[in-house]
Amino acid sequence: MVSYNSINNNLNQRERGSECITLGRLAPDFIAMSTQGYVRLSDYRGKWVLLASEPMAFKPVGTTELIKAAQFYPQLLERNAVMVALTTDNIYSNLAWVFDIYQKTGITVPFPVIADSDLSISEQYGMLNPDRLYGETVRDAFIINPYGRIRSILTLPSSCGRNFQELTRILDSLQITEQYNLETPADWQPGGSVLVPPPTTYDEIINRLNTADNHGLQCPLWYVCYTDLPDSNPDVSPQNEEPAESLTYDVCF
């Protein structure tokens, strides 16, 4: 019988180089046991993935997060996104945890919770707090695009629960950028005006100022121009992009 740990070693057999886990890099692939069976990250290609770590099972903050994530999960599915949670506990602790939530609240956790008891995935993604006790992770959330590239990294202390409205807002923003090459301003909320990238040459500056009204742009500054989103329901399916090979990266701090 082949263990998932040995499979992970084969998936990441390249020597660690000078590459770092950071935005735009290919998310390291893995296979791991979860509450829904074996999970392989690359099997989710074509979908957005929210990979979220929990310090340990049966923690108060993490329990509220699983419950809130379960309630938000339909909104993720509407965005062509899935969630994968992770703890450093064994599979039986995770199973007992999600079953306890169901027994006490009637809420089913609809996404897999990975058992990373050997810390292999946590170390790959830099989730381990250097001052950790008992192998606890920090509270990390990675948003990975349909091609397997990391588009957002959000790190919180283990004492602070995530805001899932903010996570879905970030996901909406990332999808708008990838679909339309537009940006979202401070305090942006879905449905609000978005920003066009700034001009990169002098001629583009003059052309933008002369044609802003014709293109429906509102430019309080020549490099800050607002516009409406072309489509209120952007296509979040993957574009044609050659999938890259998964690598193992060093984590940079």
Image: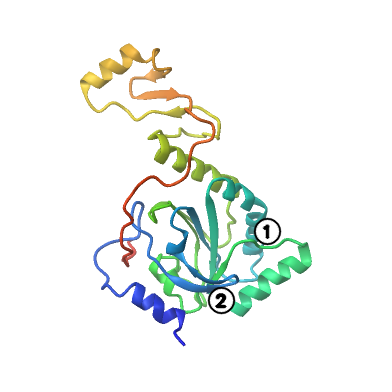
Q: Amino acid at mark 1?
A: Ile
Of 130 and 205, nearer the camera is 205
Q: Is residue 206 above or below residue 74?
A: above
Write down the residue under mark 2.
89
Label 1 environment density (alpha carbons within 10 Å; few <14, some 14–19, many ≥20): some
Q: How far is the residue under mark 2 from the one under mark 1?
A: 18 Å
Residue 173, horizontal then vertical, whole percent:
47, 40
Which residue is pictured at 31% across the width and 58% down the height? 244
Q: Residue furthest left?
A: 202
Q: Amino acid at mark 2?
A: Asp
Write down the residue under mark 1.
67
- Secondary structure at numbered mark 1: helix
Which residue is pictured at 39% across the width and 13% down the height? 214
Work out whether residue 203 can be spotted: yes
Snapshot quadrant of residue 232: top right
- Secondary structure at numbered mark 2: loop
